[in-house]
Image (spheres, grey):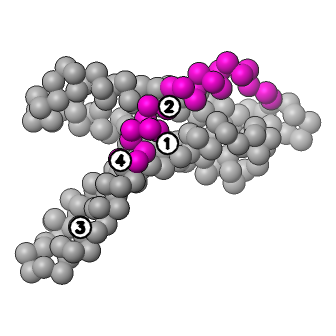
Amino acid sequence: MIRPTWIRNAEIISILPATILLLPMAGFAALGMIFAIAQDSSTSWFTLDALLQMLKVLGLFLCGFIGIISLWLALILPSRIVISRTIPRLSIFVGVLIGVADALYWLWTMAHDRSVGRSLGSSGWAVWLTLLIGPLVVSIHQIMRLTRTVNRAGTKLSAAN
């Protein structure tokens, strides 16, 4: 099962903005959050609620990181490895789902949290939609691709197998 080159190239181009901007930001922000948790946990004012809020933010950064890395693995690894082997297929599938959930949660938060929505304005919305629409579309395509399985003869089987 060979993908047309133009589809693969379009997918790579559509996740490049998120990769260039969001991947380093998520990685360094997660690292900073780990240091903040380590430093603040030793203070007397640090509460369980503060820890949970910091862990939530850390989780959001890590989920975005995992999602983009999973998309790149789905695009770069040969189809015979990604599609025909169960462990790589399921790992990439779960990673892509985590990334989709993270992106949708962020968009939902932007839409429903009035303080975030007001501070972003229309230009902020345009930037975030530009960064997230490409990866979301590629993720949907990769999810459809990964739910199909291939037998040893190379013919497609249903996702139920």
Q: Does the image show residue 23?
A: yes
Q: Quadrant of the N terminus?
A: top right
Q: Secondary structure at mark 1?
A: helix
From what the image shows, is residue 121 above or below residue 16? Answer: above
**Label 2 crowd (10 A; few <14 / some 14-19 / many >=20):** many
**Three-letter amino acid code of the residue under disc 4:** Met
User: At 35% from the left edge and 55% from the top edge, which residue is drawn?
Assistant: 28
In the drawing, does residue 29 fall left or right of residue 70?
A: left
Residue at 60% over, 33% down: 142
Element type at marker 2?
A: helix
Residue at the far right in the pictured view? 153
* Crowd rating for badge 3 (residues with CA inside 10 Å; few <14, some 14–19, many 20+): few
Image quadrant in which you'd find residue 20: top left
Task: Assess disc 1: are there few (<14), some (14-19) or many (≥20) residues with their C-alpha within 10 Å of its C-alpha.
Answer: many
Q: Which residues are magenta?
A: 1-25
Label pair 1/2, CB-CB below 8 angstroms: yes
Amino acid type, callout 3: Ala
Q: Residue 36 shows which numbered tag? A: 3
Q: Is residue 21 left or right of residue 115?
A: right
The disc, 4 or 2, on the residue closer to the chain's N-terminal end is: 2
Q: Nearer the viewer, mark 1 or mark 4?
A: 4
The residue indicated by pointer 1 is 68
Whichever of labels 1 and 4 marks the residue nearer the N terminus, that label is 4
